[in-house]
Image (cartoon, rainbow, N blue to C red):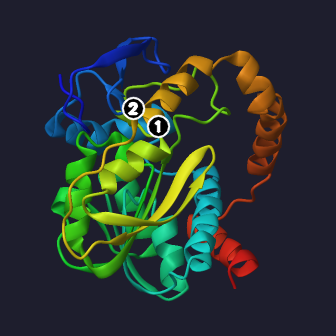
């Protein structure tokens, strides 16, 4: 297998176990460019079938969102909308790729975006259509056509077999000077539990350097937030350029960070000791949610935090 980013075959194995079920799963680090990826990379057809039927059940344990999932997704959506607005992106025709239950798409419509989405999971996409009355297509990015001023993709890119080809598709869907808002897990973070990093659903594990590199032929970086997740806004380039690989220094740093990951770092530097308290607090808040529809809950959140 060749590296999906640099096409070299210079790998170091970093894990052989799926954190979710302990099944065999080989994860490799490319010593040439710093990309971390499954080996071998699944095919597009394999991933299409998995996300259409199994993914939400495997990781959310439900076929359609529960009220607690609406609450979580609503809070994330509000935070992401604030990030967009802070960076001067506040209107236009918007496509949300991997729209889930539709909370972000719905809230964007309330603040002035002409928003729509695409979601591969049948249960979640139907929920979005029925609960919020919004335009959510059941399908993959490959099924989308048209032109957009803004495209958002939250925790989707790491699930797609070819990220560079994905950026090419996104480039073609955006108008000139259009914006792309991407969010992915940060493989270099120190606050991910060491036993919960690598699993089947994630094909690629991005650092800031590899994310920017994968986008480089098609997009220029406007801003990036580097925390537990990488949150980046890109602008479409007027013409396709040559891919710019991470430097040796950047690749070496990622390798160093992979080797540093462990329980002591997670507990102290990553503040893992706070996670139990936060989890208990979340369980209590979600248990106290009154019976209501997802639409009513989301509207209340909008009225309290976005108006």
Give the residue at x 70% y 75%: 300
In the rendered structure, the answer to whether residue 269 lies left or right of residue 6 reads right
Q: Decide: is 287 above or below 253.
A: below
- Residue 28 screen position, x and y as percent: 35, 20
Between label 1 and label 2, give the one nearer the viewer: 1
Mark 1 and mark 2 lie on one chain; the one further toward the N terminus is 2
Residue 301: image location, x then y, percent: 69, 71
Quarter residue 266 falls in: top right
Please tell me which residue is depicted at 50% across the width and 89% down the height of the picture.
112
Q: Residues within 10 Å of mark 1 (few under 14, many from 20)?
A: some
Q: Quadrant of the C terminus?
A: bottom right
Q: Identify the residue at horizontal 23%, vertical 43% (top origin).
A: 162
Residue 49, how many percent across, how many down? 21, 39
Rounded to the nearest angstrom, the CA distance separating label 1 from label 2 is: 7 Å
Left or right: 220 as drawn, with respect to 139: right
Q: Nearer the viewer, residue 142 or 234?
A: 234
Q: Residue at left 23%, top 28%?
A: 41
Q: Position of residue 175 (x, y in %)?
A: 26, 81
- Circle 2 packing at 10 Å, graded few (<14), some (14-19), many (20+), is many
| Residue denoted by label 2 | 34
C-beta proximity under 8 Å, tags 1 and 2: yes
Q: Which mark is residue 188?
A: none
SS under mark 2: loop
Q: Is residue 15 above or below residue 175?
A: above
- The answer to whether residue 279 is seen in the rendering is yes
Give the left or right position of residue 55, taking residue 218 as reference: right
Q: Residue 199 falls in which quadrant of the image?
A: top left
Q: Which residue is mark 1?
A: 250
């Amino acid at each position: 297998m060749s590296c999906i980013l640099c096409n070299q075959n210079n790998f170091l194995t970093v894990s052989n176990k799926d954190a979710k079920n302990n099944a065999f799963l080989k994860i490799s680090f490319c010593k040439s460019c710093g990309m971390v990826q499954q080996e071998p990379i699944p095919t597009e057809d394999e991933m299409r079938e998995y996300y259409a039927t199994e993914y939400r059940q495997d990781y959310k344990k439900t076929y359609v969102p529960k009220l607690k999932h609406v609450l979580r997704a609503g809070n994330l959506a509000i935070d992401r909308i604030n990030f967009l607005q802070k960076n001067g992106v506040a209107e236009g025709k918007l496509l949300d790729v991997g729209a889930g239950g539709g909370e972000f798409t719905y809230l964007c419509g309330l603040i002035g975006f002409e928003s729509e989405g695409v979601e591969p999971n049948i249960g979640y996409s139907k929920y979005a259509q029925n609960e919020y009355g919004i335009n959510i297509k059941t399908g993959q990015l490959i099924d989308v056509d048209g032109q957009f001023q803004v495209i958002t993709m939250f925790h989707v890119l790491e699930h797609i077999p070819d990220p560079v080809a994905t950026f090419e598709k996104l480039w073609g869907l955006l108008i000139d000077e259009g914006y792309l808002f991407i969010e992915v897990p940060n493989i270099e973070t120190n606050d991910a539990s060491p036993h919960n990093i690598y699993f089947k659903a994630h094909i690629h594990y991005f650092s800031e350097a590899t994310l920017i590199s994968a986008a480089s032929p098609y997009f220029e970086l406007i801003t990036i937030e580097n925390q537990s997740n990488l949150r980046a806004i890109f602008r479409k380039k007027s013409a396709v350029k040559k891919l710019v690989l991470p430097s040796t220094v950047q690749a070496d740093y990622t390798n160093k960070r992979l080797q540093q990951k462990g329980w002591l770092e997670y507990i102290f530097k990553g503040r893992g000791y706070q996670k139990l308290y936060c989890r208990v607090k979340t369980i209590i808040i979600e248990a106290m949610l009154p019976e209501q529809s997802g639409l009513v809950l989301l509207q209340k959140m909008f009225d309290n935090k976005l108006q």
